[in-house]
């Protein structure tokens, strides 16, 4: 049932009649449709006619290899990614992705992307990231026995810096503007496989969103149906696109009748996907203001998010840091401590303020441990504590 | 199948013919057998004859309510605890408990202990803890709508201090020697339910190890058999005892023929369970030296660990901080970043250096984010990075 990969080819999102072989992964976007202003990503096609739909009779659980026919070849070993729980809160379902091996959704992507590195015979993996993505790539590379280079920036939080360095990768903090040329040099001269973006608008790894598809499969089984709406924290929109694609496949396989409306939840400090959708552009780059939601705050968007929002009848939402903090606080007061960026799904749902005819899912992407300010505060010791200090009304 | 709780009574570990009603939980140990030097814990008995063993035909997964007949009543809502993956490494199976809702094994205990607070009608929950236990209790109390008081100490790591404060509890850092009297006052005067120990040797919450039993159930299903040996990080030995008890129950229910040998893995800076076992005492208190494994380093042991090690033919092992660091590093280089204390199971297995006739499990308890030193290091930015800095041999 969960046999070999049925992945067929890479297909251009710039023009879906343009296809390429599955390998090598085109990590610099579609070479035929991309221009100097807009880069188009690649997508992965499958031999859907050969999928045994009993695949969707299994229980959701750890290790995305349970979906292997619908993923590119998984040549890198698992760390038990996926199989994350749904926790109900205030009428919505929180998909808690902090329950992955490195405590963020990124593990689903990196199982697939590091597998591509192994399958391509690359001598190592390189990534530019100041947080979750870099640590996750380092963890999967370590597990696969591949060296990893992580180019990080000085502005990532101290605890996240410890995190990214934990897995034995070569980690270097470099000035932001030096990251991309250096990444390219590592790819070109060392032959390392890149799991970060290298194009003018975001294309990233062509296999990346395939890992996120598994969230859709799990939601379908956990809810026993397709949700009415899904809200995701959105940086480059690989997560948004991946979840959307998973539901599209369920419809294609005849298992579901509809696809949820997909809501992109970006920080109001930037919002390239909101801009692209508002202007009708295939992708956009915006000025980036200040935000503590460093996990999703970026000036560069991609075409994938535009496709997912538009095709599903969703919307691109912008949330302020204050709205994020409120959502983060309320989740923590239900026992779910999320990174500020990770609370963007709930913040977006609240900002929209709309009722849906069916279940609503907010994806919560990452543990609160990764946040700006974690470990920065010092708390005084109360030398002579009394009951009155603890319960003033007692 | 996973119907109501079949829990019957509390039974003294000081003398198993002495029983008490299930409620109220005796949070100050057995009142009949405890002395001024040794406090005996309570255990929970069940109507095993009424257990439908098809319970063990289900898949392991999140939410320990799937084992409800074999747990005390679960009155507090779930955060999706349990269902953690096994990751193979170097011939052993790592049970990755960092994949719980607050990223440690403690969530299994707190689901059960906070449920007891709800069932007992307590107006709140109180805990003395400098890390995982306090944060987990705060998370489950928050989820259940109960106020929580956490008495923490100044020496807990900065990131762990942010963690413990995230869930909206009243958190106060107090001098270590003031914690226990203040805890008692909160219990006696506010009626809060204690989920921390209050006795001379450790007894803790009588229902606590019941949550940890579910690890044994999961291991049995994940491995398709009983492992030959289980190594657990050991502080108060509630985890060790709980896992052991789960396997004892599987034997009692006719599902398994044997119980694994249980290995207590304590820091060599203390080691009260190793001392008790060496001297034949029911429990011991030792001098505590310096250790960074603050999650398990304590001077006070309890009777439960002695029972589990002795009855299973196991051993009490002592591991140095250097051995812990090596195990922690090697786990991280397989993609599993554990707290120093969390690596004690693997460190103990290596110290023993013995082959077993069957699978070996090392329980890894907690995320590396909680460690001493996380966020404390600063890394310089390389202003003019070159490929040679990243790959000197290239």
Image: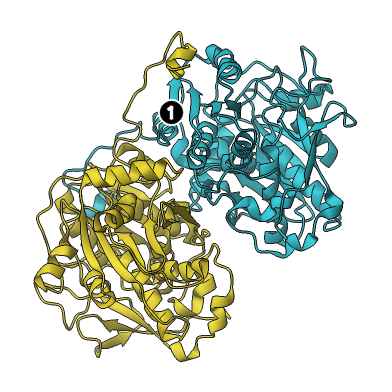
Chain colours: A cyan, B yellow
Residue A54 visible: yes
Q: Position of residue A382 (x, y in %)?
A: 21, 43
Secondary structure at badge 1 equals loop
Extreme residue toward the top, this view: B384
Within the image, what quadrant is residue B272 found in? bottom left
Residue B100 visible: no
Rendered position, B151 above or below B360:
above
Within the image, what quadrant is residue B156 found in? top left
Going 37% across and 43% down the picture, which residue do you hit?
B330
Asked whether, in this view, residue A103 is left or right of residue A36, the answer is left
Q: Position of residue A130 (x, y in %)?
A: 50, 27
Asked whether, in this view, residue A249 is left or right of residue A149, the answer is right
Rendered position, A174 above or below A26:
above
B49, B260: nearer the viewer: B260
A329, B105: nearer the viewer: B105
The quarter in which the N terminus of chain B is drawn is: bottom right
Which residue is disc 1 drawn over? Answer: A157
Going 51% across and 64% down the picture, which residue do you hit?
B77
Within the image, what quadrant is residue B234 found in? bottom left
B193, A63: nearer the viewer: A63
Q: Position of residue A6 (x, y in %)?
A: 77, 48
Asked whether, in this view, residue B217 is left or right of residue B363, the answer is right
Numbered marks: total: 1
């Amino acid at each position: 049932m969960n046999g070999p990969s049925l992945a067929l080819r890479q297909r251009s999102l710039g023009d879906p009649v343009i296809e390429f072989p599955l390998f090598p992964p085109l990590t610099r976007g579609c070479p035929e449709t991309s221009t100097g202003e807009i880069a188009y990503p690649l997508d992965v096609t499958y031999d859907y006619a050969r999928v045994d739909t009993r695949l969707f009779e299994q229980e959701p659980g750890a290790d995305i290899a349970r979906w292997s026919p619908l993923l590119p070849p998984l040549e890198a070993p698992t760390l038990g990614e996926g199989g994350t729980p749904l926790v109900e809160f205030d009428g919505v379902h929180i998909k808690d992705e902090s329950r992955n091996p490195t405590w963020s959704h990124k593990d689903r992507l990196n199982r697939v992307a590091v597998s591509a590195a192994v399958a391509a015979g690359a001598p190592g993996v390189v990534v530019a990231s100041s947080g979750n993505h870099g640590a996750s790539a380092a963890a999967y590379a370590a597990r696969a026995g591949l060296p990893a280079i992580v180019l990080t920036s000085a502005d990532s939080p101290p605890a996240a810096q410890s995190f990214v360095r934990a897995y034995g990768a070569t980690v270097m903090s470099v000035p932001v503007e030096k990251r991309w040329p250096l990444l390219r040099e590592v790819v070109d001269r060392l032959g390392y496989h890149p799991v970060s973006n290298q194009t003018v608008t975001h294309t990233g790894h062509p296999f990346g969103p395939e890992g996120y598809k598994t969230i859709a499969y799990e939601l379908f089984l956990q809810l026993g149906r397709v949700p009415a709406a899904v809200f995701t924290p959105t940086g480059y929109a690989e997560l948004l696109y991946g979840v959307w694609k998973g539901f599209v496949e369920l419809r294609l396989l005849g298992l579901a009748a509809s696809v949820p409306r997909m809501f992109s939840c970006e920080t109001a400090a930037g919002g390239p996907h909101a801009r692209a959708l508002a202007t009708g552009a295939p992708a956009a780059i915006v000025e980036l203001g200040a935000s503590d939601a460093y996990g999703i705050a970026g000036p560069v968007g991609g075409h994938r998010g535009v496709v997912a929002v538009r095709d599903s009848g969703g919307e691109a939402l912008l949330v302020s840091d204050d709205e994020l903090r409120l959502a983060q606080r309320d989740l923590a007061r239900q026992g779910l401590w999320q990174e500020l960026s990770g609370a963007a799904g709930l913040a977006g749902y609240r900002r929209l303020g709309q009722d849906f005819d069916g279940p609503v899912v907010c994806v919560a992407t990452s543990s609160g441990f990764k946040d700006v300010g974690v470990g920065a505060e010092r708390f005084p010791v109360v030398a002579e504590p009394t009951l009155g200090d603890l319960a003033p009304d007692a």
